Amino acid sequence: MKKLALMTVAAMITSLTFAQKLQEKDVPAPVKTAFQKNFPQAKVEKWEKEGVNFEAEFELNKSEQSVLFDAQGDIIETEIEIEISELPNGILDYVKKNYKGQSVKEAAKITDTKGTLTYEAEIKGMDLLFDSNGKFIKEIKN
């Protein structure tokens, strides 16, 4: 089960690396409707197509967020920008040890539809993914 969850996260993340900007008119109606239903107080700042899925970037409650939908408007995952200090213990130490001279520029908390929580630490040229306990999963080059 754990292996399947990691493979799912890896597949989603791989698809995220091939994002294409979209105009709102090119976003399927079910996706736009689902966004409005789930985030009625937010306005999309940018739409992107990630593989076969659609990502909406927006600000809500003074925090940068994004949500990834499938073409039917079902939520795949949500991402909320967090303070670097909110990353789980060990992540900053991992970066310091394994990416010498690098520092975390931005951090985010990602939750999929099953409630699985992962953390993203952005350094120069790549995103590093960690599980909810701060264990390294993989790196994604930007």
Image (tube, helix red, strand yellow):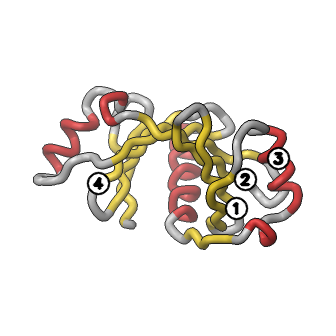
Which residue is at 70% across, 62% downward?
Answer: 53
Disc with the residue nearer the chain's start (3 vs 2):
3
Residue depth check, mark 1 versus mark 4: number of the one nearer the observer: 4
SS under mark 3: helix
| Residue 32 point in image, percent of width and height | 81, 54
Q: From the image, tell me which residue sits under label 1.
A: 53
Q: Earlier in the sequence, mark 3 or mark 1?
A: 3
Residue at x 73%, y 45% (from the top left corner): 75
Q: Left of 8 or right of it: where is 131? A: left
Q: Mark 2 = which residue? A: 69
Q: Sequence-wise, which precedes: disc 3 or disc 4?
A: 3
Callout 3 touching callout 2 (CB < 8 Å):
yes
Which of disc 4 and disc 1 is earlier in sequence?
Answer: 1
Image x and y of residue 119, in percent: 43, 39
Q: Which residue is mark 3?
A: 34
129 and 87: which is toward the camera: 87
Q: Which amino acid type corresponds to the residue marked 2 in the rendered image?
A: Phe
